[in-house]
Amino acid sequence: MDNEKMMKMPLPSSDRVIVAVRVRPFSQREKNFGSKCVVSMHSRTTLTVQDPKNPEHVKTFTFDLAYWSHSGFQKDKDGVLISADPTSKFAGQRDVFHDIGRGILDSAWQGYNATLLAYGQTGSGKSYSMIGFGANKGIIPSVCEELFQAIENQGRNQEYQVTFSMLEIYNEQIRDLLSRTKKLGGLKVREDQQLGFYVEGLKSVPCENYAQIEKLMEQGTKIRTTASTNMNTSSSRSHMVITIQLKQVFLDKALTKQSSINLVDLAGSERQRSSGAEGDRLKEGSRVNLSLTSLGNVISALADAAIGKKVLHIPYRDSVLTKLLQSALGGNSRTTLIAAISPADICYEETLSTLRYAERAKKVRNNAVVNTWSRAETKTLLGCGNAGAAEQSACFLADHQLGTQSVQETWAHLLEQARREWEQQYAAIAQERQMVKTLPHLLNVNEDPQLTGVLKYFIHTGSCVAGQAASNAITLQGLGISDEHASFTNVDGKVTVTPYRKCKVVVNGVPITSRTKLQHLDRIILGSNSAYLYIGFPSERGSEDLSRFDYDFFQLERAAAEGVSMDKLGAVSSGDGQADPSVLAVFQDYIKLMPLVAEANQMSEELKKELNMELKVKNLASSDSRGYDLQKEVMVKVTNQRTHEVWIWSKAKFINRKFLMEELYQRFLDGEESHVTQEDDPFWDPVEVIHLGSAHVWLQSLAYCMKFEEQVEFLNCDGLEEAVLHIHMASCSPTGQAHGEEDVVIDPCELLGKRMDFQIHIVQCLGVKWLKEDAKRGIQMGYRIYDLPKTLYTKPIWKIVNPQIEEIVQFAALNASQEFLNYLQTNALIVDLWGLQEGCAELSFSQLDFMVTDEGHIMVDTKKISDVKDTSQTSELYLKVLKLEQETELLRNINRALREENILLKESLEKIDSGQQGDRLLQLWMLTREINQMCTQQASCDKEFAKALKVFYQSMNTAKRQFLRLWQYKPPEDDQMLRPFVYQQSQMLKDLGDLLESSLWKLKNDVSLIVKKKREYLLFTKQ
């Protein structure tokens, strides 16, 4: 073969790792969510990423190759994606292979080792680039196909030997995907001075043509799918490594070249970050993510070394994956990394993380050499086994992997053994293909599209029992599947499914308990999450696109049947018709976690842990102090069904615990010791305080020195009433005496610069559901107002459903600022309700955390003195200075008034004659009396106006409560109750309308009376 004519990748002189980035199209889920594209590509090497929350924040990345596969494509007659027009920048599978695949082949023909790593989050398109889908072949099959095409065109004086191996790494265990026998604990990684790290006992199959490799990949994928189902694992959490050994023997030159091509599809990168599980005491426990974490550490260390930093240790030995990739990273290999990313706004964080990872990888430098030796060297090396050159050590990897065959076994003999295995497999495959055409069957549906449709379960005429028992007609493995789980009946051209006892069977998202007829393309879930697509009789089938019934379709259908939707999560479309991206991300998390929670519950049941886990959305109905929605996030509520203890786990913590649960459960399935200490048990946590809900108490009344007394609902994370808070707020004097109506102000600005005292009185908490569920529990409440540094908590109350709190706290703003007055007018006091459990630490605060007045009241609005460190000295000095300032200002005003009065009297005496003095004094007395009457009338008008505002304010509070009840009033699931619901809802709407109308009418009437009095007063003053 003329290697010089092959297209080469841009290989740097020092064999730096080549990094390519590929941007995939939107997934169906992203399209359904109305996602926006935040990635743009300006050349074949440069792309930019825009922060969806801050569009001005744009990051630019430059790599060796960049492929735009997001848009600008169409399908040709064979189903291959091609550019839609000549101006399109779309890069298809052939474009990627042209650069990367042929570059790998070129390196292999020259005698170099070559490695391709595919990195990215789950669903980013890694497997599509590596393996492909349908007519769109990926890099791996294309490399294999062109390899054998090139071999066919070689000269007679050359001999070629190709072997193929395929393995999977999950939870630090290696599984041979070409072997049907599973070794307990997985295959072991060994180290040899010449070979380096290798997998002991890994099956490596000789291949003569591409068709054989294609069948081997199909066989490996089937074993991988079966193992994924049996072990309750997802392929997105495992690494797949395909190794192709190419040996070139040049007979006329007595020369041999050997190359090792490693093609690695890495696990989903988001698992590495999600398992961080902030605050989880078991965060270091799981080994599922160890490989990716170690790989990142190796790349970072090599990148630092490449730029001249001192690196003492490269942590290759930290994981199975990094041991096997030692030569690929920093060793004897030409290595390429392809980073697959999603352009959707809801995947922004993961996309950014992937690009940063890829940016570090391109700094890594390897030292690749040609693996070649002469026949004389071969005899010497095979005879004494002391290889002298490092570059020759890899030449023996294939021989070692082929097992313990003697050197005398010829290549022809190995091929003959492989041919006999092919013949047996071909017969089984032909039989399966014939049955697919004639019988109804179940197709497996996997989270990984590459593993979907790999397993087929045929429903023969009569009754077929499905379950884990080997004696069943349909033997199924999976979490939550019983020995005899369900019965499938094929009679008279109809297929039905009947669950056994309490076995879980879901059809089209709806759980069933009795015999159910199946229709072509029905979706079936058995156990906790084993998904299958029912394919009916040939007469029922058409030319349907089965790819639309993917894993997401099953989960969305299941969620819809359970009442989970975007509307429930509060997705409000913006002006451009697009939903809130943050809500879309939460909904995506919710859908992703649904099957994981179902699996965790099943493991809890089988391991007798007595835990029940359910998904919740944090801040679903919560808002901040100004009424704006808080950031929503998915969490998991965990309840011990025996002790009634409750925990709240974040998404990251739950995923981490789920990994640990799987490890424990696998030991249980393998018959190993599954008992762990309480401290190491992923199903256990120390009891903790639980946030039950929040109540919003608006503070406008304090800005007008008005009293406020109300019963406000605590709303839980589902937006439902958890309890009712009875609270009283009132302005008061520094001594705590409540202000009366005469102290009401019309404009809050009247309080500017003055001292404001007010009390918050938490009276009672009514109907606490938390306490109704378990009488041993307790509650506390906490709140923070304005600029308080810490939260104030009420005393803990235990074992009382309607606890009387009766706690009064007085606050003082010594010199009310405009910011504080604005805060009172526009913000609410958020009171949080906390649930206490036996053995948990109670919530508390210290008076030392707050500044207090001489009377012992907590000070707010203290920005002017925030720079002073000593709180007690600050409080005392500030009070003294303020008091002196107030007294001085009062004396100045009195002095000014006395001066003006003296001047006025002096002028009056000078103008008044002695004979007219009595009349003048009488007129002056009458004038003073009229002025007093007018002032009294003015004050009366202001007081009446304040009263009218207070009445209107109270009416609006009542209306607000009625509106909240109306908003929470959900339609019943029972259709028979729909008519009473509509009637009651219309009555509630009518009552709300009547209240608003009467409130507005009364305010208008009161204001008109006040205006009338004002006019009379103005007419009187003109006279």
Image (spheres, rainbow, N blue to C red):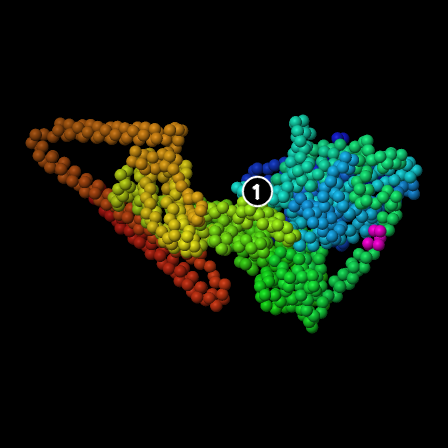
Q: Is the residue 194 above or below the residue 71 in the image? A: above
Name the kind of residue labelled 1 in the image: Lys
Q: Nearer the viewer, residue 515 or 758?
A: 515
Provide the major secondary structure of the magenta segment. helix
Assess whether residue 788 is covered by the magenta stretch. no
Q: Position of residue 170 (x, y in %)?
A: 67, 46
Task: Find numbered disc 1 in the image and state the secondary structure of the residue it sits on.
Answer: loop
Question: Would you call the spot at circle 1 few (<14 residues within 10 Å), some (14-19), or many (20 or more)?
Answer: some
Number of numbered discs on residues? 1
Residue 150 appearing in the image: no
State the residue at coordinates (82%, 54%).
421
Describe residue 533's horizontal placement relative to residue 834 as left or right: right
Residue 928 falls in image quadrant = top left
Q: Position of residue 134 (x, y in %)?
A: 73, 53
Q: Is the residue 535 above or below the residue 90 in the image? A: below
Q: Nearer the viewer, residue 829 or 458?
A: 458
Q: Nearer the viewer, residue 259 or 110?
A: 259
Assess whether residue 418 is covered by the magenta stretch. yes
Q: Position of residue 821 (x, y in %)?
A: 36, 39
State the residue at coordinates (88%, 43%).
408
Q: Position of residue 629 (x, y in %)?
A: 47, 47
Q: Is the residue 250 above or below the residue 564 in the image? A: above
State the residue at coordinates (63%, 39%).
293
State the residue at coordinates (79%, 37%).
394
On-image quarter of the N terminus = top right
On-image quarter of the C terminus = top left
Q: Is the residue 683 above or below the residue 439 in the image? A: above
Residue that badge 1 annotates: 283
Q: Which residues are magenta?
A: 417-422
Residue lying farthest to the left in this orientation: 915
Residue 537 appearing in the image: yes
